[in-house]
Image (tube, grey):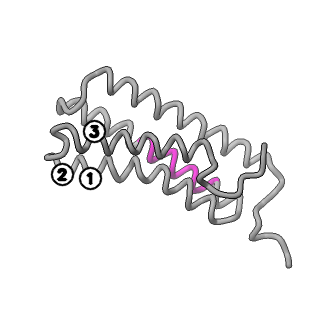
Amino acid sequence: MATIKRFEELDIWIEARRLSQEIIKISKTTDLKTDFRLRDQIKASSGSVMDNIAEGFERSGNAEFNNFLSIAKGSAGETRSQLYRVFDNDYIDEKTLDILKLDYEKLNIKIHNFIVYLSKNDFKGTKFIKS
């Protein structure tokens, strides 16, 4: 794996950002825009995925990064659950639900695989290097 110097280079962060943008678009272009609580919840949970990936990366330690990746994975699951509520309230059609649900499931697999990779890596992070 190439050395990644910024969280913006991580494929999982890039995908989480793309999906968050999809949720924002739905929140602006459908009647979800007037369901303030659900709109704010799903925007927050989808944003939390990318934010936790970024925060974990910036912690400079694999153990902390794994913890934040786990939180990001949970937020992706939360967003998937909220997508059902968005669908059940007729804000999106079934095709949109299926596409976004599958995209979040794929992202969760990628996050899981990255957690496994970090767990097998001996490098514990820059904060543990003695000066």
Comparing 19 with 105, the one in front is: 19
Which residue lies most toward the top here? 95
**Which residue has dot 3 on it?**
26
| Dot 2 amino acid type | Phe
Is 68 inside the magenta-drawn segment?
yes
Residue 87 locus on image (x, y percent): 24, 30
**Residue span colored magenta:** 66-77
Report, in whole angstroms, how far the alpha carbon at label 2 lies from the one at label 3. 13 Å
Q: Is residue 41 left or right of residue 90?
A: right
Q: Quick one: SS at disc 3?
A: helix
Question: Residue drawn at (33%, 49%), measured in percent from left and top?
Answer: 43
Other residues around mark 3 within 10 Å, as few (<14) / some (14–19) / many (≥20):
some
Which corner quadrant of the image does residue 115 belong to? top right
Q: Quick one: SS at disc 2?
A: helix
Comparing 45 with 21, the one in front is: 21
Which corner quadrant of the image does residue 68 belong to? bottom right
Q: Is residue 95 above or below residue 30?
A: above
Which residue lies most toward the bottom here? 131
Are the residues tagged 1 and 2 within 8 Å (C-beta)? yes
Question: Residue drawn at (61%, 40%), measured in percent from left and top?
Answer: 112
Which corner quadrant of the image does residue 83 belong to? top left
Residue 97 locus on image (x, y percent): 33, 27
**Which residue has dot 1 on it?**
40
Q: Is residue 65 above or below residue 11?
A: below
**Which residue has dot 2 on it?**
36
